[in-house]
Image (spheres, rainbow, N blue to C red):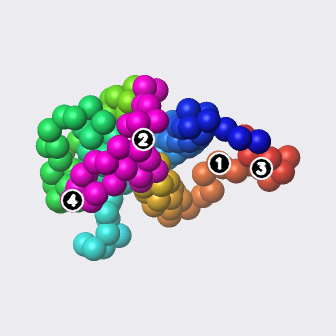
Amino acid sequence: MTMSDNEVAALFLDFSRKTLFGQSWPRIKECVAQLTEEQIWWRPNPASNSVGNLLLHLNGNARQWLVASFNKDADKRNRPAEFAAEGGLSAAELLARLGATLDEAASVLDRLTVEELLAPYEIQGYHVRGLDAVYQVTVHFGLHFGQIAYIAKTLQNRDLGFYKELARTGRAS
């Protein structure tokens, strides 16, 4: 079977949307909803990040790599500040901020063309193609969702239940 460039791009973008908005983002929100404000900013040690830091970091990453790059906006990201924060924002504020960025990112993913996916971009000092940028954000979200889930499990001393359907039926929900 031969597919056109447009069909391959549509499959790639559909998978990216499902992964970001159908898996990682809902699970992140569920993890954060179960944590207290103190737990949101808890760090196991000075070399590690809190859930709050990770939410700020995911926001900065998605805004820089998807929103600013594809919309040709100025890159205003302050990456060190994402990791330096030690509080000041509630879970609701962090989720609202990330949610707004993801809404913008969804609009970008909904309109990307094959040409934009193959075009060169310079993002965070890296020379990439549009495909790379979308893939980077998708993988990056999965990486930090895992960290957030691990922190939530550690602090609550319980399974988060994301894979109960898989255990019950052999298929993920």
Q: Which span of residues is magenta-colored?
A: 109-137
Identify the residue at horizontal 28%, vertical 57% (top origin).
127
Identify the residue at horizontal 23%, vertical 41% (top origin).
89
Name the one closer to the observer, 137 or 164. Answer: 137
Helix, strand or loop status at disc 2 = helix
Disc 4 to disc 2, C-alpha distance: 18 Å
Disc 4 to disc 3, C-alpha distance: 40 Å
Q: Residues within 10 Å of mark 1 (few under 14, many from 20)?
A: some
Name the one closer to the observer, 130 or 15. Answer: 130
Toward the right, the furthest residue is 169
Identify the amino acid type marked 3.
Leu
Query: Residue at label 4?
Result: 125
Name the one closer to the observer, 57 or 50. Answer: 57
From the image, state whether disc 1 or disc 2 is nearer to you.
2
Counting residues from the start of the chain, the first of labels 1 and 2 encountered is: 2
Identify the amino acid type marked 2.
Leu
Identify the residue at horizontal 70%, vertical 50% (top origin).
163
Q: Quadrant of the C terminus?
A: top right
Query: Residue at label 3?
Result: 166
Query: Residue at label 1?
Result: 162
| Label 2 close to label 3 by CB (< 8 Å) | no
Disc 2 to disc 3, C-alpha distance: 34 Å
User: Could one spot residue 86 in this view of the protein?
Assistant: no
Counting residues from the start of the chain, the first of labels 4 and 3 encountered is: 4
Disc 1 to disc 3, C-alpha distance: 9 Å
Q: Is residue 67 above or below residue 144?
A: above
Identify the amino acid type marked 4.
Gly
In the rendered structure, find residue 117 and report the number of the disc placed on it. 2
Counting residues from the start of the chain, the first of labels 2 and 3 encountered is: 2
